[in-house]
Image: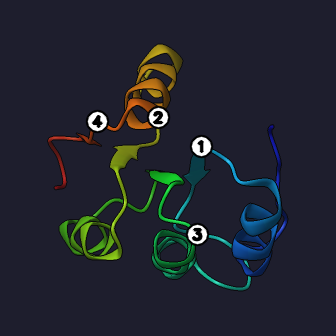
Amino acid sequence: MVAKLASGDRLVPEALESHPDVALLDIDLSGTDGLTAAAELCEQLPACRVLILTGLATPDSCGRALAAGVSGFLVKGVPADDVIDAVRRVARGDRVFAEQPC
């Protein structure tokens, strides 16, 4: 299933209903920010892997993502094939992190 949400506030309720294997999130979401939503999702639905894809990549945001329990962190601008590969790897249980800024 693929879902596109307009607000980070809807992430956890939607995921609890649809049980996705992977959630691909940006940090900059309206309502609840992506890192807060990721932490809530990892806590409430641990079977769902979270991959962050963001243009707001800093060492601090990467550290917060790690603390939230995400399985991956990529910086926007990477080739689409790299994003697809990361989603597949995260779904298999691997961890995928960009060298910078993490």
Mark 2 / mark 3, whichever is N-terminal: 3
**Mark number, residue 21:** 1
Circle 1: element type: loop
Gap between marks 2 and 3 measured at Cα: 23 Å
Q: Which residue is mark 4?
A: 94
**Label 2 is placed on what type of residue?**
Ala
Give the number of the mark in front: 2 or 3: 2
Residue 68 position in % (x across, y down): 35, 75
Could you tell me which residue is drawn at 33 percent across and 67 percent down? 69
Give the number of the mark in front: 4 or 3: 4
Q: Which residue is mark 3?
A: 28
Circle 2: element type: helix
Q: Which residue is mark 2?
A: 91
**Label 3 is placed on what type of residue?**
Asp
Residue 8 position in % (x across, y down): 70, 74
Could you tell me which residue is drawn at 71 percent across and 54 percent down? 19
Could you tell me which residue is drawn at 45 percent across and 77 percent down? 39
Give the number of the mark in front: 3 or 1: 1
Q: Quadrant of residue 96?
A: top left
Residue 27 position in % (x across, y down): 51, 67
**Label 4 is placed on what type of residue?**
Asp
